[in-house]
Amino acid sequence: MKREGILLVLVTVVLLSTLGGCDGAITHVTDTERELYRTGKTKAERAEPTRVPVETDGTRSLESPIYLGTNLPTIKDEDHDLGVTLDFTYASRHIWKGFDYFSNNRSAFYTSADIDFWGTGFGMNILWARPFGSGYEDWEWLVYSPYYYNALWQDTPYQMDYRVGWRYYNHPDGPANHSCHPRDLDIQRVYGRFSWPRVCSAGFVPYYECAVIWPDEGGKYDDGCSRSYWSDGWFHTFGISKGWMVPGFFPCQPEQQVIHTGFEIVYNDGVGSTPDSVDSGWSHCVFSLSTEFYLRPNITFIPAIYYQSSWEDSVNKNDECWVTLSTRITF
């Protein structure tokens, strides 16, 4: 807890000092950079309807709950250069698909790198999730995720942004100890995420994600004990998000601040620790609130808060509330 407190103080000091001195920070940039710095987007981009940005499996809150406040692309544009986004996130709790992944409300730090290959629609994301404190080293993970994004029926009310990909969750310090046998923690996932940014003129953006998960090492030992900690199954996520315009909080920020709100509900079809340990059903819902502060033309600070209402005890017996503090750097 001491290290977490120090980290929070440092982040707060850096943020406030940067915001306080932002007028000097933008004196040596071009008019275009100044516009991007103050608004976060070009005028054309700010006129676009709010989209549900695709998740990158770890930043903000692990795998969403609703991955808000990003500028990651949703429509391929082959005129773009190679894009790199670095993200550094502190999470007061490490929640994954409803599970308290580092039990006892353990906090975590996420570091991720996202590479967009010249606007072709193909990309690669690598995430490192590490808990604060000792005792959970086996559960620390590296996630490798190639993906493809694009949109159908662009510039129509029926436009559908989509992203499909594969993820491999590697636990370098596993397997986890178990009274029966050590159990492998690695899992794989194939997913598709779809959103409709123009279907509602009021700015509400519905989305849906389906994902199938299976253990990297299946089967059982000769004595009948499972080789994997995880059981396979599906996740179905239904959600909606909206950006609300409010007066800017600081003079060096956009004249209108965007507050992102979201809600999603998750159906867990049997994914859990050890086979048959999770009952299929609606496991939980999540409410989220986030915004962005533009510290430099390519640096964004993103605070967010989440509340999870847990419905299935075999997934999580407790409701959860946590915050994330993220710094994103784009190149």
Image (spheres, rainbow, N blue to C red):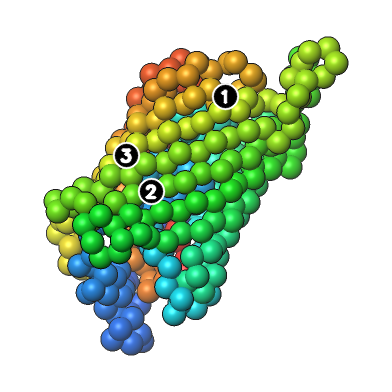
- Seen in the picture, residue 36 relative to 277 is either above or below; the reply is below
Q: As drawn, which residue projects farthest toward the right?
A: 222
The amino acid marked with disc number 1 is Gly
Camera-side residue of 156 and 242: 156
Indicate the position of residue 268 as horizontal and vertical percent values.
Answer: 47, 26
Which residue is denoted by mark 1 in the rendering? 272
Whether 29 is drawn above or below 282: the answer is below
Does the rendering let one see residue 104?
A: no
Instruction: Kindly identify the residue that appears in the image at 68 percent across and 43 percent down.
Output: 170
Q: Amino acid at mark 2?
A: Phe
Nearest the viewer among 202 and 295 is: 202
Residue 5: percent from the left, percent from the top? 48, 42
Q: Secondary structure at mark 2?
A: strand
Instruction: Give the CA distance from mark 3 to mark 1.
Output: 22 Å
Measured in 3D between alpha carbons, the distance from the residue under mark 3 to the one under mark 2, in whole angstroms, is 10 Å
Return the disc, 3 or 1, that comes first in the chain's sequence. 3
Instruction: Indicate the amino acid at tag 3.
Output: Gly
When asked about the image quadrant of residue 29, the answer is bottom left
Pointer 3 and pointer 2: residues touching (CB < 8 Å)?
Answer: no
Q: Nearer the viewer, residue 50 or 177?
A: 50
Residue indicated by mark 2: 194
Q: Quadrant of residue 222?
A: top right
Which numbered disc flags the more N-terminal residue, 1 or 2?
2
Residue 168 rendering spot, x and y as whole percentages: 64, 45
Left or right: 329 in relation to 183: left
At a point 38% along the width and 72% down the height, the residue shown is 296
Identify residue for label 3. 239
